[in-house]
Amino acid sequence: MDYAISAKNLKKTFKLSAKQRKLDRTGARTKTAVDGLSFDVRRGEIYGLLGPNGAGKTTTLRMLAALVKPDEGDAFIEGVSVVDDPLKVRGLIGFLTSELKLEEVFSPDYLFNFFSELHHVDHAVRDARKQALFERFGIDRFAQTKVADLSTGMKQKTSLAVSVAHDPDVIIFDEPTNGLDVLTAKTVTDFLLELAAEGKTVLLSTHIFSLVEKVCDRAGIVIDGHLVAEGTLPELTGGRSLEDVFFDLYAARVGEAS
């Protein structure tokens, strides 16, 4: 099968500062955030990486987005290696993280134009897409407002619009609904489903069970940098609740580690 995203034995280790070792109550000088992680995402599906904070989800997505280089392994976006051609990978994807901080002195209109320019989007195409996305998310009324003066929800909607300004076929979202109010979270969730309906491939990370249940065609459960289970929701749960399955897997993993 031809996949839009393929992760192959990804591994990433970080050095721990003295302060971090103290906070973590460990004498180890390194932490393995991702350890031999492999999975594939089919074209046109929504695939979720589900796991607790610190499981390695964000590090995994950053490697897939060619923002962090893996220590071992490789990943491929539409067949392009993140190790061998990271610049091309960045042009193929839309990437959104909850940690993205938009420059507060600029307006949504300016930022959309700026990121469109980075991706060499034709001006006419840019303007049509900007109008459609801004109307879709209600940004049009705030198009000339400085980011500093936008609400948290509107900042997230602006980030979302900017991340897909170039109409990518592969979209990677890190915790797309984290910290959002119910209405904004629903807007984001609906948009994820719309992207998939258009044939886009969506990979997202989350610790929210309900988001996986609402939007994901398949999901992988990540604990302590390892993929411990994968499949459709029925395959993962076997008729049980996703939450119960997750906590059983977590308990088993912690037991193995101890």
Image (spheres, rainbow, N blue to C red):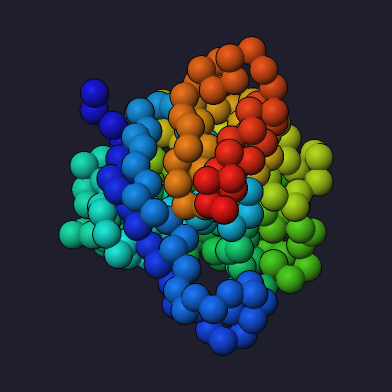
Residue 88 versus residue 68 in the image, above or below = above
Could you tell me residue 55's position as x and y percent?
A: 55, 53
**Quarter occupied by residue 131:** top right
- Residue at (25% x, 52% y) in the render: 74
Total residue callouts: 0
- Residue at (35% x, 28% y) in the render: 42
Q: Mark yes or no: residue 7 visible.
A: yes
Foreground pick, 219 / 127: 219
Name of the residue lying farthest toward the top:
239
Residue 151 versus residue 220 in the image, above or below = below
**Quarter occupied by residue 138:** top right
Compared across the picture, whether 67 is left or right of 257 comes to: left
- Residue at (78% x, 68% y) in the render: 149
Could you tell me residue 77's position as x and y percent?
A: 29, 45
Foreground pick, 107 / 150: 150
Could you tell me residue 112's position as x and y percent?
A: 52, 58
